[in-house]
Amino acid sequence: MPVLDASVVIDWVAPDVSVSSRAVRTLRRLSAEGAELVGPGLLIQECANALLTGIRKGRWSGSAADKACGFLVGLPLKLTDDARHVDRAWELSRRFDNHPIYDMVYVAVAEAAGIDLITADETLRSRLQHLAWIKAPDL
């Protein structure tokens, strides 16, 4: 049961996702394990915004993004209440060079639950490399 951040989930649903991507490999493994997938409530909004950004930048069509957004909201995710974790996320952000608080919400959720965080965000992983439970997607 890991916490997943938007950098992983968007690579599951994006219209141009490669079936050999690290995120897709991670999803296959987690599905095979029957793992419960966890994230803060902001996960859906962050991924939906990435889909809109892809339309604006001409990366994919509006209809492809609409389909991807439908897939996104249908994912079997257990979403937590972000408000419960804002204080801890703030502490973490301040401690680690004022790193964006929305990233630290994912960290706070994983920390509170005592489970791994899977993120493709290399900056976040590097900044928190001393925490063994923050992991990259499968190779």
Image (cartoon, grey):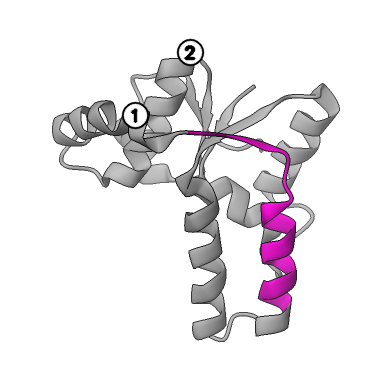
Please give the range of residues in magenta.
64-80
Residue 88: x %, y % from top left: 26, 26
* Residue 132 in view of the camera: no
* Residue 29 in view of the camera: yes
Q: Residues within 10 Å of mark 2 (few under 14, many from 20)?
A: few
Residue 63: x %, y % from top left: 72, 81
Residue, disc 1? 85
Q: Classify residue 85 as left or right of residue 79.
A: left
For the N terminus, the quadrant is top right
Residue shown at the point (56%, 81%) measured from the top left: 55
Q: Classify residue 87 as left or right of residue 66.
A: left
Q: In the picture shown, does residue 57 fall above or below 85?
A: below
Residue, disc 2? 114
Q: Amino acid at mark 2?
A: Gly
Q: Nearer the viewer, residue 16 or 103?
A: 103
Marks 2 and 1, Cα distance to the nearest angstrom?
A: 14 Å
